[in-house]
Amino acid sequence: MPEYLVFTLASTLASMGDVAGHERRGTWTWPGRSAILGLLAAARGIKRDGDFSALDALQVSVAVFETGKPMRDYHTVQTIPTAAVKRPQSRPEALRLLDAYELRQQKPVHPVITLRDYRQGVLYGAAVQGPALETLRSALEHPTFHLYLGRKACPLSAPLAPKIVAAEAPEAALAHLTLPPWQGTAMAETLYTEAGPAERIETRHDAPTDRRLWHFSQRQVHVRTVTIRPEGKP
């Protein structure tokens, strides 16, 4: 019977990378493979240019207990055209030079309004299968870097409560999760996994191929209906 490392992901605010352009940073309704592996890497102290081979070998499943409510935040960003400012030494210097450029041209360089999407009040269960699960469990209990769900402004709101369990399938392993006390009766009805039967298959661009350049490839995600009522104790 295979072993799984299961842990809880709860956050008041989360953002889980959709395909993004310059002006928009969207979010999926559940954390994908890159989010889970990134969190495990942070726990182990692996930097972006580090060795991810052990993490890339993991099989990831995510159960959705609460997708949260959508929230959108807006940012005003002043871009600095290279035609206006050549090689500034700092952001303040670039803005001063831009003011002078606008006076010479007698026309302003308008700022860009960008938007960021978030999910409020999310709750997920993650199950990973593969090598070195005990090392990962220990790292989640004593992480090297600060852990967050998607962006640094989105800290976790409850302990991950990692544990290793033997089970026939990820949904059986996730039944051993320890949920936050205020979510004790939560139930998951949807499982996103990389193996086993599927009611439908989705395609996501969340398999990291070059973390330094922020490149991701497609992967096939198996989706199936489940009933998971965790009864795990700390």
Image (spheres, rainbow, N blue to C red):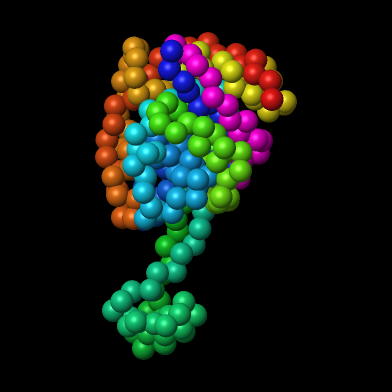
Determine whether, in the image, residue 161 is placed left or right of residue 212: right
Report whether residue 7 is seen. Answer: yes
- Dividing the picture into quadrants, the one containing residue 107 is bottom left
Instruction: Give the x, y percent position of residue 175.
Output: 56, 15
Q: Is residue 164 magenta?
A: yes
Q: Main secondary structure of the magenta part?
A: loop
Quadrant of the rendered image containing residue 68: top right
| Quadrant location, the N terminus | top left
Percent coordinates x, y for residue 94 in the rendering: 43, 80
Observer-nearest residue: 15 or 179? 179
Q: Is residue 117 shown in magenta? A: no
Query: Residue 55 sits in which quadrant?
Result: top left
Range shown magenta = 155-169
Q: Is residue 21 visible?
A: no
Rendering coords of residue 9 (x, y %): 57, 33
Which residue is pictured at 68% across the width and 20% down the height?
233
Please tell me which residue lies in front, 212 or 106.
Answer: 212
Q: Is residue 106 above or below residue 205?
A: below
The single residue placed furthest to the right in the displayed view is: 181
Is the residue 103 above or below the residue 194 in the image? Answer: below
> In the image, is residue 84 above or below residue 208?
below
Q: Is residue 184 above or below residue 119?
A: above
